[in-house]
């Protein structure tokens, strides 16, 4: 049998795979013998199928192609043709009656081999270990009951989602964003006038309305709808982006807008709320209608609403959900009804302390009071129309901002909403129903009114929820990725019987002992592409075992991996020496074990090759993750791997080396890396501070400079906008990059030790100078006030430092300073973001300059790089 595994790739991390077979026959009967079920990998190659289902039989795999072995060809778990080590096995006792339930076989190893591409997916061959007096039957994929067919359940490790956030252009008073595909619509205010805008993610901005009285937009396809007050009458309007045509939809002049009550659209159906004749000024006694307009028929239909006040409504497909209450007070008992356009029937979905509902397909997302005695305690729920079951998504009681009651939004399996915290902060969260995973989308503390379409989330960010100063941000959600790499290798044999011979181009490497001679190996992979920012999740050393061909050995070979104690030279390394005229301390190589003990015996990795096994002509794997992490993190210099056997007698084996001719059999290391989200922040505000011109403001020069020249000192102050990252706890590293270019081609008498400090107070880029930090406000100490890393005013322990040698001329490249600690203090809210004060440790005869944010070349401006965990 075969399952389609094409949805999984080499980036998939399969943690479990279970084949389930439903046992039903022989009904009510036992068997004389047990049935030991075994799973193997079919050996046949692919054609249209790996085997043609129209022709496959006991003798044949295709119409004219016979199996080499009647009954099927297979490989076992060890890669042996017609071998007998199954990938999975279970025993069904002959004394047991069929109990009409699934039986499970763990096929994780085989599924992993298929999805990583080690082997082509040829399916699963199922047989009994012995095949006599033990017949049983399971339902097949052609059985009528889907709940009894064969199935495979694959569990996959999922990485955290990665969120890429951008801010789109607005007038600064944006509200009510709504998204469809790559188009975002929103209302924006300018000089007291509110109009509708559409922003295409490719960068195009469209002004949709021009009256200054429009609000509450919604979009579907190329159609935008909104409410607009013209001549004292509120009506619904539509704009078609494709035809650039505006159409008035309603004419009664009583349409409602603003927030949850704005119009909604799905395909050719527009829905809006309209006041009826019983409206009264105190709002507790007014009654409104919900109106449906069909663009195809140009007909309006009113939906009967049980309660007086509509809190929210939404449409998807032929279903409209309505949340309504008896009064305009949102925490009073309320209901959610669903109106079916196809049947014109209304169904009560749920009653209670409800507010704000959204719908996608058969799922309704809504807010409900978790504590009836506390009107501000709401949680998020999802109701499935197909199962008539609901689940609680959030449990913290803060799934709603009690000031604005913003709607949740749902698309496929993903729901977005804003959480409101007691400190007044509000952030957007996403819940994925497919994996029950909650993800925080924003960290600014000012985010609300989210909407989602596919992988894109849009929301507004308030500076103050009581004002109209809002911007719109867009976040793109993507699955975390693994990066798999294979790296080149150098290797040498170490042979005790030829202790000074260099074996650097042998076609094999060998370990163990034979005829009282010991054999070891040393090899090294180039890991320079990985840095301390790399997130290595797995590293496997693969060695292809081929010798002694067809033979066993008297003893097992326990292969062990150690860390060479020092670097070695490929051209000179041998049993006795690590370099030309440089001996090992111990013949056979010096090493550290996993515990850091010189010549210790706790290996980083080990496998046992049984003496009773002949070479399998395949790769054998050693998990060297810990050692590779130590190298890539910079904990130790990469000195490679020393490979030896635990005992060195009567257990000699050999693997192909890096000098072997077949690329598919050479040593290799497979490194699996989690792709780390990296954000680069530019657009810094920077100013020079020059002692010789103590009151001059240098806010727009093309360079910033530090150090001293001609008895004059130079310092700089720079700030990046980190407001978007406020409260973000997932920043793991932060680095400031400065591009050094001056004095071109010249050295300096002294080194320049660059230091980073925290400015002691805020400063104004329009007025900051050597003497002053703002208009009429002086520094306490000319040249700037700062705190050092220990919190000491004018202290001498910098947050970050690097040394640029006076003997080195500028090399026109970025220099990096690790400002992680200071950035974390800013984003955590521990300190106000006052930026970086940059100075030299000593300020004489060591003047250098970097390009500033005003240099005009984006590839040379100061930048701040944030690396996320």
Image (cartoon, helix red, strand yellow):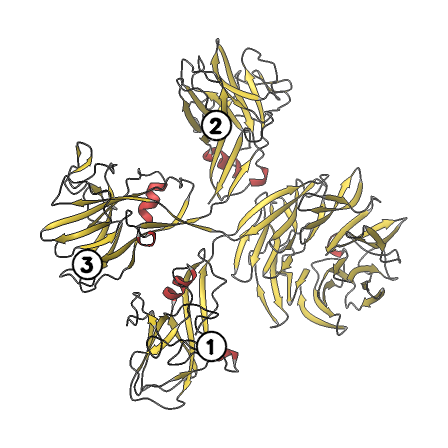
Judge left or right: residue 600 versus residue 426: left
Q: Position of residue 115 (x, y in %)?
A: 43, 61
Up the image or down, 607 lies above or below 126; here it is above
Question: Badge 2, how many Cα within 10 Å: few under 14, some, many 20+?
Answer: some
Label 2 or label 1, whichever comes before in sequence order: 1
Give the label on residue 53, or none. 1
Judge left or right: residue 366 versus residue 494: right
Snapshot quadrant of residue 51: bottom left
Q: Is residue 120 or residue 483 the one in the foreground?
A: 120
Q: CA distance from mark 2 to mark 1?
A: 62 Å
Residue 370 can be seen, yes or no? no
Give the label on residue 528, or none. none
Q: CA distance from mark 3 to mark 2?
A: 54 Å
Give the label on residue 813, or none. 2
Up the image or down, 815 lies above or below 524; here it is above
Query: Could you tell me which residue is drawn at 52 percent across and 78 percent down?
Result: 146
Secondary structure of residue under mark 2? strand
Question: Badge 3, how many Cα within 10 Å: few under 14, some, many 20+?
Answer: some
Q: Are marks 3 and 2 in contact (CB under 8 Å)?
A: no
Up the image or down, 330 lies above or below 796; here it is below
Snapshot quadrant of residue 118: bottom left
Circle 3 residue: 548
């Amino acid at each position: 049998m075969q399952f389609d595994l094409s949805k999984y790739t080499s980036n998939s991390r399969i943690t479990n795979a279970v084949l389930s077979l439903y046992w039903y026959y022989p009904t009510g009967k036992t068997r004389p013998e047990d049935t030991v079920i075994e799973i193997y990998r079919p050996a046949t190659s692919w054609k249209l199928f790996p085997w043609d289902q129209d022709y496959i039989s006991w003798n044949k795999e295709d119409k004219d192609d016979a199996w080499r072995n009647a009954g099927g060809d297979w490989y076992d778990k060890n890669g042996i043709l017609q071998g007998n080590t199954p990938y999975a096995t279970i025993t069904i006792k002959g004394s047991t009656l069929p109990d009409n339930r699934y039986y499970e076989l763990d096929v994780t190893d085989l599924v992993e081999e298929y999805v990583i591409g080690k082997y082509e997916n040829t399916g699963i061959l199922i047989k009994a270990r012995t095949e006599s007096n033990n017949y049983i039957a399971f339902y097949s994929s052609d059985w009528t009951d889907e709940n009894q067919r064969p199935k495979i359940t694959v569990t996959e490790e999922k990485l955290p989602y990665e969120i890429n956030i951008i801010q789109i252009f607005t007038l600064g008073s944006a509200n009510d964003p709504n998204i469809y595909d790559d188009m975002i619509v929103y209302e924006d205010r300018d000089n007291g006038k509110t109009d509708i805008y559409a922003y295409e993610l490719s960068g195009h901005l469209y002004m949709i309305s021009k009256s200054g009285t429009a609000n509450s937009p919604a979009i579907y396809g190329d159609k935008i709808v909104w409410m607009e007050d013209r001549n004292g009458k509120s009506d619904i309007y539509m704009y078609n982006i494709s035809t650039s045509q505006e159409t008035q939809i309603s004419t009664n002049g009583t349409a409602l807008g603003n927030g949850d009550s704005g119009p909604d659209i799905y395909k050719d159906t527009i829905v809006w709320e309209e006041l009826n004749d019983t409206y009264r000024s105190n709002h507790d006694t007014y009654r409104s209608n919900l109106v449906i307009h069909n663009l195809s028929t140009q007909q309006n239909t009113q939906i009967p609403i049980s309660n007086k006040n509509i809190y929210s409504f939404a449409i998807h497909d032929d279903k409209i959900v309505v949340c309504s209450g008896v009064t305009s007070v949102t925490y009073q008992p309320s209901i959610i009804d669903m109106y079916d356009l196809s049947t014109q029937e209304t169904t009560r979905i749920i009653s209670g302390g409800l507010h704000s509902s959204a719908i996608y397909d058969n799922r309704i997302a809504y807010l409900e009071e978790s504590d009836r005695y506390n009107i501000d305690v709401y949680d998020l729920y999802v109701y499935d129309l197909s199962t008539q079951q609901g689940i609680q998504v959030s449990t913290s009681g803060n799934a709603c901002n009690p000031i604005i009651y913003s709607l949740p939004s749902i698309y496929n399996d993903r729901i977005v909403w804003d959480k409101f915290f007691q400190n007044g902060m509000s952030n957007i969260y996403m819940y994925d129903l497919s994996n029950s995973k909650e993800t925080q989308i924003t960290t600014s503390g000012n985010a609300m009114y989210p909407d989602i379409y596919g992988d894109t989330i849009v929301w507004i960010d308030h500076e103050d929820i009581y004002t109209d100063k809002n911007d719109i941000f867009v976040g793109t959600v993507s699955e975390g990725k693994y990066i798999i790499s294979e790296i080149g290798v150098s290797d040498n044999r170490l042979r005790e019987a030829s202790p000074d011979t260099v074996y650097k181009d042998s076609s094999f490497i060998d370990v163990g002992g034979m005829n009282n001679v010991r054999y070891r190996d040393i090899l090294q992979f180039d890991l320079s592409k990985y840095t301390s920012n790399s997130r290595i999740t797995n590293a496997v050393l693969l060695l292809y075992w081929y010798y002694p061909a067809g033979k066993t050995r008297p003893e097992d070979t326990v292969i062990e991996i150690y860390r060479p104690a020092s670097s070695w030279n490929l051209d000179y390394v041998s049993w006795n020496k690590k370099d030309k005229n440089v001996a090992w301390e111990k013949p056979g190589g010096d090493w550290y074990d996993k515990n850091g003990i010189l010549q210790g015996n706790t290996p980083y990795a080990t496998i046992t090759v049984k003496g009773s096994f002949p070479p399998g002509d395949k790769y054998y794997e050693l998990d060297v993750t810990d050692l590779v992490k130590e190298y890539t993190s910079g904990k130790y210099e990469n000195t490679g791997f020393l490979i030896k056997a635990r005992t060195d007698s009567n257990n000699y084996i050999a693997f192909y080396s890096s000098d072997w001719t077949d690329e598919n059999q050479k040593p290799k290391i497979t490194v699996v890396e989690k792709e780390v989200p990296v954000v680069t922040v530019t657009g810094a505000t920077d100013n020079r501070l020059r002692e010789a011109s103590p009151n001059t403001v240098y806010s727009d020069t093309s360079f910033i400079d530090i150090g001293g020249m001609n008895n004059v000192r130079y310092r700089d102050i720079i700030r990046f906008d980190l407001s978007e990252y406020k409260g973000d706890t997932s920043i793991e590293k932060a680095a400031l990059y400065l591009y050094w270019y001056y004095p071109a081609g010249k050295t300096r008498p002294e080194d320049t030790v660059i230091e980073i400090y925290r400015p002691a107070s805020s400063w104004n880029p329009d007025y900051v100078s050597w003497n002053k930090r703002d208009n009429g406000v002086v520094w306490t100490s000319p040249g700037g006030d700062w705190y050092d890393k220990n919190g000491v005013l004018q202290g001498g322990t910098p947050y970050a430092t690097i040394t640029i040698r006076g003997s080195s001329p500028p090399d026109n490249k970025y220099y990096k300073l690790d400002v992680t600690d200071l950035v974390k203090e800013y984003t955590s809210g521990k300190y106000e973001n006052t930026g970086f004060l940059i100075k030299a440790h000593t300020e004489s005869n060591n003047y250098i300059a970097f390009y500033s944010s005003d240099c005009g070349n984006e590839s040379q401006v100061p930048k701040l790089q944030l690396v996320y965990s």
